[in-house]
Amino acid sequence: MIIKKYQKSISALCLIASVAIITLSCDSHGSLAPQPQPQPRVSGNGFSGPETVVKAFCDFDARGKRFLRHLSDKERTFYQSLVHWEAEPVWKKVIIVKNYGIADIKKNHDTAEISVTYHRNAEYAAGNLLIQEKVEKIKFKITKTDTGWKIEGPIVCPHMDAKTLVKKLEYRLRHEENSDIRAKIQQDINVIKNLKYFSFEKSNGL
């Protein structure tokens, strides 16, 4: 008899506990209360240090990917993970480079300065090609954010390898209707293809 009463008491307690749990999970109207949803994770660029971010930026730039209107959503997201600025200027000048490499690195806890040396072949601006071989040194400022290292600046004009520029000019050539402009574009393509360092060489520094 005592055992039966004990079992009934346990059953009653379980029933009360179940009602309490359901009550806590419901709002005042008896509907299930909305459960907190996980916040979307902000993905970073996945690079471990500022040097690798600068390398990725230079590679992206050399392949002519900084003209954002031509990028896929995946490429655009990747590029935005490398830099702090949200938009690129309307570039009217492109530097044609033979190669580039990291020259100097100054790194603190959450900031860094990395200098990149570019070996330039020519400059292409407003449809005019200027052959100009020289060495250019750019100092990039990088900061550590919640999503990884990002380049603060400077926002320099695109530094592109010659073959990539030729591909872009050939695309323009196929879609240009003006015969005079077509002739000028074809002339520029021929000159660029005859550059001393038409084949792009990656520097050992990167």
Image (spheres, rainbow, N blue to C red):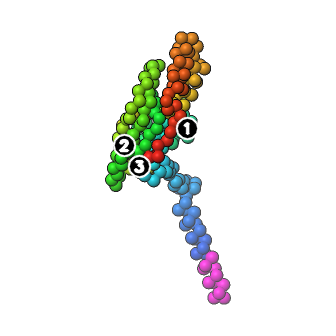
Instruction: Give the residue number, with chain letter if any, for mark 3.
Output: 50
Residue 84, horizontal then vertical, whole percent? 40, 41
- Whether 141 is drawn above or below 169: the answer is below
Q: Based on the displayed image, in which of its 4 quarters is residue 2 positioned?
A: bottom right
Residue 19 is inside the magenta segment: no
Instruction: List the residue tagged with mark 2.
Output: 115
Residue 5 is covered by the magenta coloring: yes
Q: Which residue is mark 1?
A: 73
Image location (x, y in percent) of residue 155? 39, 35
**Could you tell me residue 140's position as x and y percent?**
37, 41
Q: Which amino acid lies under the numbered mark 2 shown in the image of this protein?
A: Ser
Indicate the quadrant where residue 12 lies: bottom right
Q: Residue furthest bottom?
A: 1
In this view of the protein, can residue 151 be seen by the observer? no
> Magenta stretch?
1-11
Helix, strand, or loop for circle 1?
A: helix
* Amino acid type shown at disc 3: Pro
Q: Residue at x 49, y 32 (%)?
A: 197
Q: Which residue extends farthest front?
A: 196
Residue at position x 33%, y 53% in the image: 108
Secondary structure, mark 2, is strand
Quarter of the image with the N terminus is bottom right
Question: What secondary structure do most residues of the magenta stretch adopt?
Answer: helix
